[in-house]
Image (tube, rainbow, N blue to C red):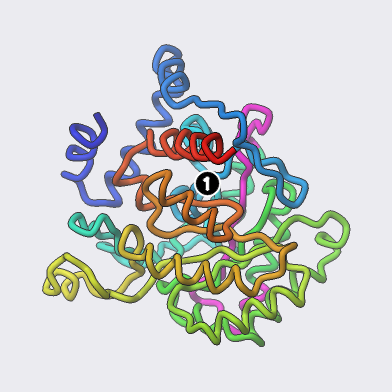
């Protein structure tokens, strides 16, 4: 039904408009008792081998929603009802910011991809904290992660202070953290993947009294456009610090091997590419990271996942958890259940 009727209808609207319409409709369904029952029945699934424990946290299943889908934590209840094992909110910054001007989100239908240059648009960390405070966690199955960044106006030499503000504010309300230094849509942000800059940010968080008193997992999200040598350097840093893992990977600035006409791509301009076109690059990056990351660290793999087969390949290649975003837009809400059922079937057949 989604691919035949709902997706064509949503795709009549601008991408950002349809995104908000879909999420508001999801929230509305939960408020209507009969629709809520139907929705929960439709998307519910319980496999025998789904749970995964990392860092002392039990994830209901390994399928997560990547950051950027619900930046401000407005739709956690609805997304949780779709069966995600974990939901990552953000990227959030200390101060609210509008992000880049519209249009800033583009569909590549032929490629089953998206290009975005959102620019960390969010309502600021205080607004997110207030929302998480009011959330009844006893009614939420999913683990909640907080993806943190810096404001556009903050110079890179002060970036660690922005990450610190978000970390301290969110600490009581999220289960793990992701340090985002890899979005291509905030000027100069990727320069923070330089070892010295990265070490300052990470050690600033690790050295807080908050972390020493009540440590929560900290992961690093990196770019798929890094060279293998740069990845080796970053993994070496993560191995040497008490950082808990790496997310492979963010969006790419590459435009290689696209089916979409080059004239259309040129018209769209700058932005990060996600979805099916980034799968091969993300898989290569996962291989590199897995080969060098210490066994006590975890990997969350994201990039081009649309099916249980894609998810299984990531897990077999070293990922502990997987996240979806663009594939979820093209495949629809039943995608989560399908992946979970497929992974359960694969586990049963192997066993």
Give the residue at the far right of this rendering.
213
**Apparent side of residue 86 relative to residue 6 in the rendered image (left or right):** right
Residue 67 in picture, x, y percent from top left: 50, 55
**Which span is picked out in magenta?**
134-161
Query: In this view of the protein, which residue sits in the foreground, 223 or 207?
Result: 223
Q: Is residue 169 left or right of residue 88?
A: right
Q: Residue 177 in the image: state x and y as whole percent.
A: 65, 58
Q: Residue at x 68, y 76 (%)?
A: 201
Residue 326 placement, left or right of 180: left
Query: Which residue is painted at 73% across and 45% down in the image?
Result: 57
The image shows a total of numbered marks equal to 1
Q: Considering only vertical position in the picture, is 280 above or below 11?
A: below
Residue 35 placement, left or right of 94 = left
Q: Secondary structure at mark 1?
A: strand
Q: From the image, which quarter does the N terminus lie in?
A: top left
Residue that badge 1 annotates: 64
Q: Where's the C terminus, which quadrant?
A: top right
Task: Please tell me whether residue 128 is drawn above or below residue 81 in the rendered image.
Answer: below
Image x and y of residue 222, in percent: 53, 71
Q: Which residue is found at the position 59% from the left and 42% from the top?
A: 131
- Against 48, residue 253 (above or below) is below
Assess whether residue 259 is covered by the magenta stretch: no
Q: Position of residue 8 (x, y in %)?
A: 17, 40
Quarter of the image where one finds residue 266:
bottom left
Front position in the image: 272 or 61? 61
How many residues crowd mark 1 within 10 Å: few (<14), some (14–19), many (20+)? many
Identify the residue at image location x=47%, y=48%. 70
Between 198 and 302, the one nearer to me in the picture: 302
Q: Which residue is at the front of the view, 319 or 191?
A: 319
- Extreme-top residue of the structure: 34
């Amino acid at each position: 039904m989604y691919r035949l009727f709902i997706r064509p209808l949503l795709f009549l609207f601008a991408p950002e408009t349809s995104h908000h319409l879909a999420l508001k409709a999801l929230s509305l369904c939960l408020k209507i008792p009969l629709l809520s029952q139907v929705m929960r029945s439709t998307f519910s699934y319980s496999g025998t081998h789904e749970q995964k424990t990392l860092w002392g946290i039990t994830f209901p299943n390994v399928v997560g929603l990547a950051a950027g889908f619900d930046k401000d934590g407005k739709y956690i209840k609805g997304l949780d009802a779709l069966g995600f094992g974990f939901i990552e909110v953000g990227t959030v910054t200390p101060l609210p910011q509008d992000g880049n001007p519209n249009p800033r989100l583009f569909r590549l239908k032929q490629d089953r991809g998206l290009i975005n240059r959102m620019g960390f648009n969010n309502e600021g960390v205080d607004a997110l904290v207030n929302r998480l405070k009011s959330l009844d966690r006893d009614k939420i199955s999913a683990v909640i992660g907080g993806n943190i960044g810096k404001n556009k106006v903050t110079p890179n030499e002060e970036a660690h202070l922005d990450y610190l503000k978000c970390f301290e504010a969110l600490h009581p309300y999220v289960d793990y953290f992701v340090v985002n230094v890899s979005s291509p849509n905030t000027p100069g942000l990727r320069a923070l993947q330089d070892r010295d800059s990265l070490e300052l940010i990470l050690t600033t968080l690790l050295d807080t009294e908050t972390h020493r008193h009540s440590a929560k997992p900290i992961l690093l999200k990196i770019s798929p456009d890094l060279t293998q040598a740069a990845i080796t350097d970053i993994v070496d840093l993560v191995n040497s610090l008490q950082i808990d893992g790496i997310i492979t990977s963010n969006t790419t600035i590459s435009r290689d091997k696209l089916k979409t006409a080059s004239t259309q791509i040129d018209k769209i301009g700058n932005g990060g590419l996600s979805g099916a076109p980034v799968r091969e690059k993300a898989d290569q990056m996962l291989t590199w990271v897995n080969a060098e990351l210490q066994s006590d660290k975890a990997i969350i793999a994201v990039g081009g996942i649309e099916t249980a087969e894609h998810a299984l390949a990531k897990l077999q290649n070293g990922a502990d958890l997987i996240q979806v975003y663009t594939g979820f837009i093209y495949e629809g809400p039943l995608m989560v259940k399908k992946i979970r059922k497929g992974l359960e079937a694969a586990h049963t057949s192997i066993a």
